[in-house]
């Protein structure tokens, strides 16, 4: 994406957009933007082909949802918003150009909504959604009423977007298509940098340069991990550019230093100190050291914004989690079913290691749908290594909206690369066949997790129903 052709934050407001139509309004990113606009009083319509969970709430807020993609959906519309997943020749996008309507990438519409707000933009290869959600809850808990758009739903709020009355705007900043370079944040949080989306960036050095450029856009300060992947060069580059950088982590050089980190199935806790002064124990009811790091980024940011420590700690202790992030869907036939959004190898491995602890004496079964063709191809070995943490893997075909799979690419090749015995892994391309396969492989005490592309988030309830309907799970003792 050529971001020089996009409209950066500060040149438009949400009200300038008039009546807004979002192509693919049900996806979590678009749904969050739609909810933000609706709660701000902007007329919103959208089109979809699937009845996503977010659509009912958007209708209740006054949004119009068309369950088809046709030219007439644009009648009365001033601005059409598309995402990177929408092809250039899409029928509504082509019609918008023909009519001379304002056409904006999702990031441009989001940037317009951020105008005149003190934005806190969270970027990084992984950890963005949880960190953005925690930052939002901290601001809410301290009475700030922030606006926010998140690539996931905060469990307590059931929403991925909201127009608030406070000065802050919290946003998950997407580096995959370079669109985060049109934001103009007051605070930039960069959780980590690892090789990903190299189809757009070309190589790791270009990706690192992109994060450096993003950090340099902040007019306040930058927060990043002192001992995270890829951040050492970033910190040096930002400081050389005259930017104020605050760091967190276990390193002795970190401004907010973490120590005595303990992670269990009930959550993670650690001792924190800022500039050498003890802050006390920080707790988060989500397991995993990586979750502790996410929380540390928000604690540091909140304190540098002048928010009270006691309220920050209370907010973290009450944080309910994010839907699709270690979300327990239920239990049936003695099998616990979870849903997890992870699809980058590092996140996959971290999530499955945590779920391995949850499984205890039971086995861990993962149903994985790869999200993107290029990512599955470029990171196949790393994904396979991460998935091998599970006892059994059911791998689906790549979701890949707008992508074409080449020979030897996709779910079958990924399945073959997983270092598990042949009877412990299987390629099941279509969802209709997955519930029966899960029932066949499960036994009481197991943990089953659906993981990967967004559509798989709809599958947890179907798995629970299939497990509940099974008269008796097969004896799989080995």
Image: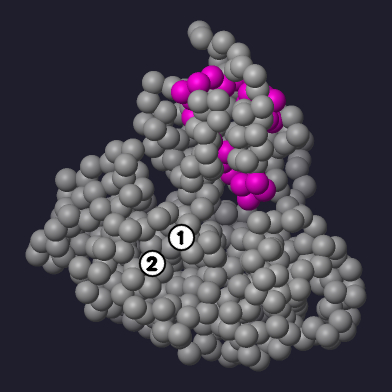
Residue 344 visible to the viewer = no
User: Residue 32, labelled with which disc?
Assistant: none
Q: Quadrant of residue 136?
A: bottom left
> Can you say whether 307 is above or below 226 in the image?
below
User: Residue 156, labelled with which disc?
Assistant: 1
Relative depth, front residue between 135 and 373: 135
Q: Residue furthest left?
A: 277
Q: Is residue 245 magenta?
A: no
Which residue position holds label 2? 137
Span highlighted in magenta in the image: 434-458
Residue at image x 43%, y 57%? 130
Locate residue 466, reporting x and y percent: 66, 30
Q: Measure how far apart labels 2 and 1 are at the Cα level.
A: 10 Å
Residue at image x 51%, y 9%? 477
Locate residue 334, reporting x and y percent: 50, 25
- Mark before the other along the chain sequence, 2 or 1: 2
Residue at image x 65%, y 34%? 465
Q: Are marks 2 and 1 in contact (CB under 8 Å)?
A: yes
Q: Is residue 313 left or right of residue 40?
A: left
């Amino acid at each position: 994406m050529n971001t020089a052709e996009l409209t950066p934050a500060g040149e438009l407001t949400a009200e300038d957009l008039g009546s807004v139509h979002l192509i693919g309004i049900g996806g979590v990113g678009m749904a969050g933007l739609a909810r933000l606009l609706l709660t701000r009083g902007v007329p919103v319509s959208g089109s979809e082909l699937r009845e996503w969970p977010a659509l009912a709430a958007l209708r209740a807020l006054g949004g119009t949802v068309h369950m088809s993609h046709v030219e007439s959906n644009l009648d009365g519309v001033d601005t059409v918003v598309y995402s990177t997943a929408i092809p250039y020749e899409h029928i509504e996008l082509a019609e918008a150009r023909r009519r001379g309507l304002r056409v904006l990438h999702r990031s441009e519409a989001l940037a317009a909504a951020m105008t005149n707000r003190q934005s806190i933009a969270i970027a990084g290869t992984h950890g963005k959604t949880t960190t953005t959600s925690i930052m939002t809850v901290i601001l809410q808990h301290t009475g700030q009423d922030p606006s926010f758009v998140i690539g996931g739903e905060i469990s307590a709020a059931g929403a991925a977007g909201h127009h608030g009355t406070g000065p802050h705007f919290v946003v998950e900043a997407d580096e995959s298509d370079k669109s985060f370079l049109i934001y103009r944040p007051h605070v930039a949080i960069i959780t980590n940098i690892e090789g990903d989306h190299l189809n757009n960036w070309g190589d790791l050095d270009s990706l690192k340069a992109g994060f450096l450029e993003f950090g340099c856009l902040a007019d306040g300060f930058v927060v990043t991990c002192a001992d995270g992947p890829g951040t050492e060069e970033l910190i040096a580059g930002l400081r050389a550019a005259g930017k104020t950088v605050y760091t967190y982590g276990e390193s002795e050089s970190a401004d907010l230093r973490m120590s005595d980190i303990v992670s269990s199935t009930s959550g993670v806790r650690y001792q924190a100190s800022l500039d050498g002064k003890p802050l006390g124990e920080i707790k988060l009811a989500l397991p995993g050291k990586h979750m502790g790091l996410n929380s540390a980024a928000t604690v540091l940011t909140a304190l540098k914004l002048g928010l009270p420590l006691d309220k920050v700690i209370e907010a973290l202790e009450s944080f309910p989690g994010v839907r699709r992030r270690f979300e327990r869907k239920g239990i049936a036939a003695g099998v616990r079913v979870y849903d997890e959004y992870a699809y980058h190898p590092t996140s996959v491995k971290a999530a499955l290691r945590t779920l391995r602890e949850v499984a205890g004496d039971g086995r861990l079964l993962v149903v994985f749908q790869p999200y993107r063709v290029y990512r599955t191809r470029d990171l196949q070995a790393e994904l396979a290594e991460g998935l091998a943490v599970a006892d059994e893997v059911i791998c689906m075909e790549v979701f890949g909206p707008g992508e074409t799979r080449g020979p030897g690419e996709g779910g079958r090749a990924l399945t073959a690369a997983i270092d598990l015995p042949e009877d412990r892994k299987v390629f099941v391309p279509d969802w209709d066949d997955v519930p029966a396969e899960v029932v066949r492989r499960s036994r009481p005490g197991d943990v089953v997790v659906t993981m990967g592309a967004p559509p798989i988030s709809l599958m947890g309830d179907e798995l629970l129903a299939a497990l509940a309907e099974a008269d008796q799970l097969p004896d799989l003792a080995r």
